[in-house]
Image (cartoon, rainbow, N blue to C red):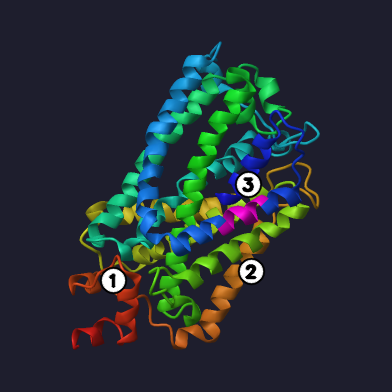
Amino acid sequence: ITFGLANLISTTATVSTTYAPTAGKTLGIYAALLISHGVINSFGVRGLRYLNNTSIILHSVGISCFCIAVLAKAPTHQSAKFVFSTFYDGTGADGVGWSIRASPAYVAATGVLMSQYTITGFDASAHLSEETRNASWSAPLGVLMSIGVSALFGFFVILALLFSIQDFEATVGSEYEQPVVQILVDIFGKPGAIALMTLIMVCVYHCGLFSMTSNSRMMFGFSRDGGLPHFFDKVDTRHRAPIRAIWLAATLSFLLAIPSLGSTVAFSAATSIATIGLYISYGLPILIGFIWPSHFKKGPFNLRFASRWIALVASLWICFITIIFCLPTANPVDSQTLNYTPVAVGIVALWALGSWFLWARRWFTGPVRQIEAEQMGIDLEDPAAMEKMEAQGGVDNFKTQ
């Protein structure tokens, strides 16, 4: 998300200026954004709830106004036939794309990447469940609501932009190398396009900020459970934030973007890595619950009779996208257009599996039983309270205190 924002900033800066974006400049912008996210998450925990409310307003009211303005201001509108039936293959640098070299289905399948990545953030409700009251119900409801709202608003945005394209060839071949910027310039002119792109970037900034919040809580929880060194499970008593986990998340995020210095498909590869990694982590417990349902204890919120069918479909779909998103998206394939997703995902998979079979399975006992802790009256909104419980030996020992 934040790497995409860095690209948006670089692209928008070329409108009405002589700024020339490079991979190095974009990486520098990315580093600055990560630092700002880390600082806010480290020292502004109490303000995150207010920023979250601001984000909700921006993503609902702000984006609705954006779409209405685009549709109302556009001099002309494309037909429904153009929007829903036009096929464009932009994967070939020399005009020969994957629809010719392989098939249109290949282009359509790899094109699912951005749509799939858009809804990955729904797991934030799970990562923040330790800081949520009545998590056994509110967390799954948050997941469902985030997917539904994202799908609704996302579809609305896409339709507004597609119907408002003024010159299709000029849009896909834009000098700004960003079709959305070109659409906005054609409709509002350069000053208006910069203003609306700023709104988009502010929304994306909030997404990146809370993505780091979610990621750091996940790392904090994993460290507390013994999956990462306990160095990262410390909570700052003054700011009530897992500062070490926050900066671990920022550092790893930056390291994953370094290959962008030598790749023209870096954003696509980074997106593939994030999407595959997240969906594999979603899919493993789903698959385990499908194969061994008798060993899977359902919570208060569950899908009942439809659970196993949905689990089967979800598992098959995750297997499909894991393969598809490792394939190249640009033609011809060379050192600049190679999709390095399989390498990055493979290294993580080998490390995770290798460490499990070699040593981790001897001592890793699983996650903290959060729902039991909640029922005992522990304040789940306070990471320090959870840390105290673990320091006393976990849920079972805490009961005897």
Q: CA distance from mark 3 to mark 2?
A: 26 Å
- Residue 326 shows in this picture: no
Q: CA distance from mark 2 to mark 1?
A: 31 Å
- Circle 2 packing at 10 Å, graded few (<14), some (14-19), many (20+), is few
Q: Is residue 238 above or below residue 31?
A: below
Q: Closer to the camera, 136 or 72?
A: 72
Closer to the eye: label 3 or 2: 3
Q: Which residue is mark 2?
A: 347
Does label 3 or label 2 sit earlier along the sequence? 3
Farthest-out residue, top: 75
Query: Residue at horizontal 38%, vertical 69%?
Result: 240
Does label 2 or label 1 sit earlier along the sequence? 2
Does label 3 or label 1 sit earlier along the sequence? 3
Q: CA distance from mark 3 to mark 1?
A: 36 Å
Place residue 363 in its image quadrant.
bottom left
Q: Amino acid at mark 2?
A: Ile
Q: Which residue is mark 3?
A: 6
Q: Secondary structure at mark 3?
A: helix
Residues in magenta?
29-35
Residue 38 in the image, given as x and y percentages of width and height: 52, 61
Pointers 3 and 1 in contact (C-beta within 8 Å):
no
- Circle 3 packing at 10 Å, graded few (<14), some (14-19), many (20+), is many
Residue 158 in the image, given as x and y percentages of width and height: 50, 29
Taking the magenta stretch, the answer to whether it contains residue 318 is no
Q: Amino acid at mark 3?
A: Ala
Query: Residue at horizontal 57%, vertical 79%?
Result: 354
Q: Is residue 192 above or below residue 198?
A: above
